[in-house]
Amino acid sequence: MPSRLNCHYENLSSPYLLQTTDYQKQFCHLYAHRLAEMTRLLAPLGQTKWGKEVPIMKLCELRGEQNVQCIIIGTVYKHQAHKPSILRDISEENQLAPQPQRQNYSEPEDKVMLEDELQRVRLQGEHLEARNLATGIVCAVKGGTDNDGYFNVEEVLFLESGPQKPLSPRTPGSKLVIISGLDQLQAHNYVDALNIFQYWLSGCLGNSREAQSTVRLIVAGNSVRSTAIAHAPTLQVARNQANANDTVQAVGQLDSWFVSWAHALTVDVMPGAYDPANFMLPQQPFHKCMFPLASQLSSFQSVSNPYACRLDSALVVGTAGQNVADLLRSTSLDSSLQALRCTLTWGHVAPTAPDTLACYPYISSDPFIMKECPHVYFAGNCESFETELHVGTGGKKTRLVCVPSFCKTQSVALIDLESLDCRQIKFSAVSE
Amino acid sequence: MDAKRKFNGNGPANGHSKKPRKYDDDDDMGGGFEAELATFEAIDELDQSQLLGEGPENQQTSERWSRAPPPKLDPATDCLIFQQLDVENYVGQALPGMPGAQLGPVPVVRMFGVTMEGNSVCCHVHGYCPYFYITAPRDFEQRHCSELHEALDKKVIADMRGNKDNVQEAVLAVELVQRLNIHGYQGDDKQTYIKITVTMPRFVAAASRLLKKEVIMSNFDFQDCRAFENNIDFDIRFMVDTHVVGCNWIDLPPGVWRLRGHNSKPATESRCQIEVDVAYDQFISHEPEGEWSKVAPLRILSFDIECAGRKGIFPEAKMDPVIQIANMVIRQGESEPFIRNVFTLKQCAPIIGSQVLSYDQETQLLDKWSAFVREVDPDILTGYNINNFDIPYLLNRAAHLKVKNFEYLGRIKNIRSVIKEQMLQSKQMGRRENQYVNFEGRVPFDLFLVLLRDYKLRSYTLNAVSYHFLQEQKEDVHHSIITDLQNGDEQTRRRLAMYCLKDAYLPLRLLGKLMAIVNYMEMARVTGVPLESLLTRGQQIKVLSQLLRKAKTKGFIMPSYTSSGSDEQYEGATVIEPKRGYYADPISTLDFASLYPSIMMAHNLCYTTLLLPGTKDKMGLTDDQVERTPANNVFVKAELRRGLLPEILESLLAARKRAKNDLKVETDPFKRQVLDGRQLALKISANSVYGFTGAQVGKLPCLEISGSVTAYGRTMIELTKNEVESHYTRANGYENDAVVIYGDTDSVMVNFGVKTLERSMELGREAADLVSSKFVRPIKLEFEKVYYPYLLINKKRYAGLYFTKPDKYDKMDCKGIETVRRDNSPLVANLMNACLQKLLIERDPDGAVDYAKQVIADLLCNRIDISQLVITKELAKTDYAAKQAHVELAAKMKKRDAGTAPKLGDRVPYVICAAAKNTPAYQKAEDPLYVLENSVPIDANYYLEQQLSKPLLRIFEPILGDKAESVLLKGEHTRTRTVVTSKVGGLAGFMTKKTSCLGCKSLMPKGYEQASLCPHCEPKMSELYQKELASKRGLEETFARLWTECQRCQGSLHEEVICCNRDCPIFYMRQKVRLELDTQQKRVLRFGLPEW
């Protein structure tokens, strides 16, 4: 077998790794830190955009003065009547006949508010695409208050992601494969597709040149399962999560797949929303004991979700898709790609965490702020493959990739790290 | 007397009137009247001199606050139309040109109201005088009237202790009139009565007493002359005679009224924008029909106060300052308040959308608030528990600080609002202290009292109530924190203000949601009593008001009845012995529509138709002209005389039918509310007529009527049973022999032995028609619903799935089952609910049994969330005779931390913990938080045996029979128990913890102390690791959902959650999940960090 290209790799996920945990803390610290950090970055941008005449003010400084033009920087809070609520779920009526969770609970009646360190104000205005905003976004708004206690927004400014380092590929033509949603529990339905994928990885399908240039495989979550375990309704008993035997088996099978793939190239495995991993973001890497065979190979590792790494000069950042899925539920954004783009332009990987997306209660950091603009930004477990080369301010170019769920599409995403081109490769055994 | 005056808060006691209670599970007729009678006594004259003072002028400071200026009015050409809200009387001077007494003090009626344009009106009505009747002694003739007039006048004046009002004339007129006694049929020939008109309301009692006790005229003896209508409130009397009903529209046509102005005589007395005088016989009182059913844009002020208490002591007005008062003012019919503000002590950061008014001095704060109330001029004052807390606190505090003019909160300039205290004893509520404050012209409408009256809830805290009706939790700041927030900076005070504003806003939202104002207003209109009396008085006044109105038109007068306090009982409603069991087939239910009212109508039962013993022969009535009731009383038939009560009921039910028809076509949501409120009020009123006749200490009890009503009811139920069972038989060609399995008061449950809903409905309808045809009109048996399946536990205890149409059930209907009891833990209610749902909706009796077993197993294994086990009791007093769990606990907590321990009046939540054998239950109560933090073991047996077993056995016995107990409480599932080791007490101090294997729990062998698994379990590491991780995963999800929920509820992302609302179901959960997550994380970490 011809030797593969080798490119420089650096794992940048350490901010996502939790060494110690403290669950006595509340979520306000995370919000407070996010606001402080992003205000620091947004304030100069606002001054540049709107000039120094418009002052940046705190809501509490708007004492009864109306129609003063000012800039307010704060966290968006979206009040939504149908937001999932544990209170409602455990209320007497709902316990036994739980209402199915709504796929999308964004409604025209949703109220969008902006909250700074101390106060909140309701936002309105034509330029405010309220239905596409989500709780947790930090932004700067220009406008003024009115008599009814609304803040009339004229313009909104987001942080976008931070600066981007130039792309200078040292390994021409190197490619990255991202796969997600292997759902080993369902794998009997597409075991052929998986085999073809394996042949393709090792270049046995007459694609040896392509295979040689493929430097890395990222498994972006939901390798074990891709749907939630159904809970039997129960009376608020501390939830007794049965450890399904099939899950253990599926992990064992995955181990063998990973072994064979890791023989071909380096493999990074991220946990996903439904995998046997912790629930809160950032999800921690799988424990070595779960993959006793693969973990012995140096070309195999489990990484956190979200995951960030540098391949040569390209910064690759991505998640297993929870951030995108959550946004699709709470906003009227209609495609994963749109949602993914939004998180990039908002400068935050997972703004809805912790509100509707479970997240560790950080005290003095927010690892989800995008301080550096990635070259490849992906989300796993999407309904279908979508991609776009997003050009941000200052010509920052980012390849957005919605990696399709393999169990649904039997396809993966292939990204050229030099040109940032991206395409979908299908392994459907039926059509081929 | 004083103690009886004010509302006693015994809402749930009014069992007989079918009020719109959500979870009414005891529909007992009759009971409860005694309890409310205490409130029925006439409100005696306030000693006005105590209240008088020199009130301040209104100030106009804000356009937003003040009402729009009134239009220029010319009494000669303009009419004045307003909706009156309050009717009261005072003693004033006669106004020249007005009817009635011209000398000395006279009673004047004051009506307060609002015009359609939103201007407030005070209308003085002159010339109406109180009167009463006595039967004329034999030979008393017209010519004796003047003599009696003079003699009685002298006696009454002489009887007065002092004459500070300088009364010169007490008796105004004595005349002979022809009237009929309402009580007992005496033929249509009227008798002669003496009508005595006096100048002042208080002379009614005095004159009738003197007539009874003293010799007034030498040649006539009045001692045996029965007095009539001398016990009627003056206000009610006035309203009856002038056809004014509660909250109706009053129309003053041009030329009959006088406008008071700056220099008019008499001068203005009120703070209303328009103040007028009119004679009592010159104004038009519109019936609340058609156009006149509209509602004026009333101003409703809802407010809430915060006090800075000291640690561990309930705020006392003499010590603890008022630091904030939040206000919301809404116009009736609008959805959002147009005034939102908060008065704060010391600077407070601004709140967008609300006005913040900060003052450095508390006296200033109170003074400005009082001025604010006068300026806003609200028609209705509301809030949560304002009658017993906020208002008295403010008044006491202002008095303590000597804030000038604070107490002038009413609409009459020179009358102070003062607190009257009273203790009230009632069967249902125990001893209760109530306070009442007068606000001339403004109606205090405390939401708390409304809820207490109309809804039966597990808890009446504002938190619980808002969760119940709005499905929203409310952030609760512990009183010990309030003082800290006040002593912080302007931002912490702002936080407090937000909280205070929410507490002022919630009552408005609840009033709107429950449509309380509209419904009460319609009730006032239908029954003809003032709005306020609906909250302060019992049921009787409503019936009395209607009866008086009806009697007047027919020339009847009511004898005054002095309660004999007899214990004479009449037989109650009947119950057909239930055939207990779980019925999987459809059970048709036949109901008598408005049973008691229709019995009274059908059989012409009334005071006026009752034949007293002996009268029949005396009057020479034949047997066809009378009807003997099953209770062996005799009433004349309608052909001879139509009874008043049947007429009242007919008009009530006809009006209800009209309202329901109008409701069908009305599209305007606000008008729909009014109509719906009306039809409800009419229904309740119709049902309370029966209760009025049965109230033995009431105004005019008549056990012949009430006893006959129930007797008819009983025979009808029996008859229905016989008809149905004899007609629907196999012999007559039906599928099966029908069996009446249960019958109660006004409904009969029939098992036709058919399998489909359609067929059971068809038969039900047919049977209803068949049986109806056997009864006198308007008694009608209606087919209403099918229960399918049906669980009949016992008398008045049953549950079923309620169908009115075959395709889908309407609801799950439970009667008399432990779902709302307050002294139970939520576990009981939730388990009952769940089991019933499984039994009835899922039709899975086995599943229900399994579920109950599962919960019992969970309970024994300590897997039930602690919030499910919390029992809550109010700490009413500390010196109970018997030791009580919550009192003992409060004392224990005080020793731990006096600052946060519950105080008198607080509600104490507790759980029962395991203790040594034979420890009395009251010593086993513990603070749920303490239990959580110290892993104190729960006494699962207590919960199983004292709380769960009885209700569970009750619902499962019909299914499992005698083996229910052994299956549920003694089965396999009760064998495994988890005992938590406490961190405190007992042997906790002597224990050392050794590491054990996470897989098999065995102690770790040497050399493995640091590892997670023993050598034996090591091969299964992946599996065991995943197991631990799965537990952590569940906890993480719960943790995130709980704490973000609290953030949303408190309305802030960047501030820490400080809420300590113990009523909130997630309060304990969020604490528990923290502890469990920490523990679980430690277990997971024993496998080592996932490092690569």
Image (cartoon, helix red, strand yellow):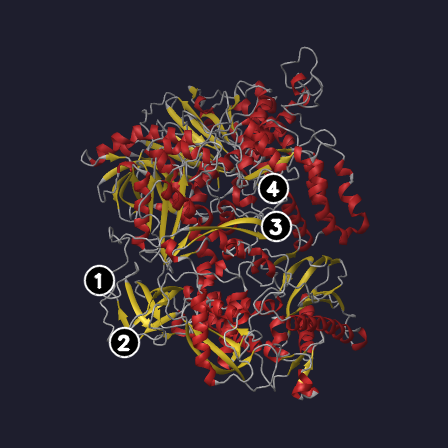
Q: Nearer the viewer, mark 1 or mark 3?
A: 1
First in sequence, mark 1 or 3: give its number.
1
- Helix, strand or loop at label 4? It is loop
Instruction: Say which of B372 and A266 sits in front.
Output: B372
Q: Which residue is mark 2?
A: B254
- Chain ID of residue with mark 1: B
First in sequence, mark 1 or 2: give its number.
2
- Helix, strand or loop at label 1? It is loop
As drawn, the label of residue A230 is 4
As drawn, the label of residue B262 is 1
| Amino acid residing under circle 4 | Ala
Res B256 → quadrant: bottom left
- Helix, strand or loop at label 3? It is loop
Mark 2 neighbour density, 10 Å: few (under 14) some (14–19) many (20 or more): some
- Residue under the image location 26 percent in, 42 percent down: A155
The answer to whether marks 4 and 2 mark residues whose Cβ atoms lie closer than 8 Å is: no
x, y percent for residue A407: 55, 39
Res B76 → quadrant: bottom left
| Amino acid residing under circle 1 | His
The answer to whether marks 1 and 4 mark residues whose Cβ atoms lie closer than 8 Å is: no
As drawn, the label of residue A125 is none
Mark 3 neighbour density, 10 Å: few (under 14) some (14–19) many (20 or more): many
Q: Nearer the viewer, mark 1 or mark 2?
A: 1
- Chain ID of residue with mark 2: B
x, y percent for residue A224: 58, 33
